[in-house]
Amino acid sequence: MSGNALWQYRWSDDFALGDPTVDGQHRAFFEEAAALRAALASDEPKECIVAYCAAFVANLRAHFADEERLMGRIGFPAQNIHRQEHQRLLARTEEVVAEIHAADCLIDCLLGAHALMEALVEHVTNQDMRIKAFMPRQCA
């Protein structure tokens, strides 16, 4: 994905892994990505953006933990590599959130947030699809 492709991306049931919890989180993530962009590009007060970011980080942590439990349950062979990717993405998320907290002008944060959301959505649409092949038939 590049440029504005992220913001044009919509949830597709093709991205579903077959686990209701993880799939619901992924679906919500697409909505959250668009909401963050809209909030950063608008005249939303900074405290609203900061509150949104705190909730987003908490949701992302919970999602990664749920997805890692799922990988363990199904015996996903690349779970250590996938877990490292989660750690990298979470660290980058926290960097961007810190930039937003420190920013005088939130529009300056738009590019960083855009790149972060692009990486996270790409993770769902590419990396997480590798998990799908290992889902039990009754779930997938």
Image (tube, rainbow, N blue to C red):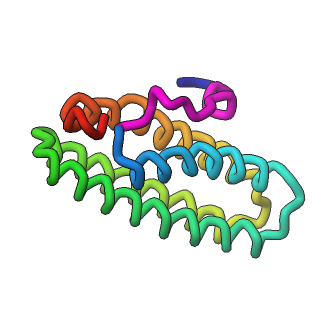
User: Residue visible at 42% across and 38% down?
Assistant: 124
65 lies above or below 25 = below
Near-viewer residue (138 or 5): 138
Is 129 placed left or right of 106 in the picture?
left
Expressed as whole percent of the image width and height from the top left, the position of residue 36 reads: 69, 53
Q: Residue furthest right?
A: 43
Name the spot of residue 60 as percent of width and height, x first: 45, 60
Q: Picture coordinates of residue 106 (x, y %)?
A: 76, 59
Q: Nearer the viewer, residue 124 or 38?
A: 124
Residue in the picture at 77% in, 55% down? 39
- 16 up-or-down from 35: above or below: above
Direction from residue 104 to residue 19 in the image, left or right: left
Identify the residue at horizontal 48%, vertical 69% (top origin). 58
Q: Which residues are magenta?
A: 4-17
Farthest residue in the front direction?
Answer: 138
Q: Quadrant of the C terminus?
A: top left
Q: Confirm whether the magenta stretch covers residue 12.
A: yes
Asked if residue 102 shows in the view, the reply is: no
Residue drawn at the location 16% of the way across and 53% of the way down? 73
Does 1 appear in magenta?
no
Q: Camera-side residue: 113 or 61? A: 61
Counting the numbered discs, the total is 0
Q: Is residue 60 left or right of residue 129?
A: right
Which residue is more in the foreground, 3 or 14? 14
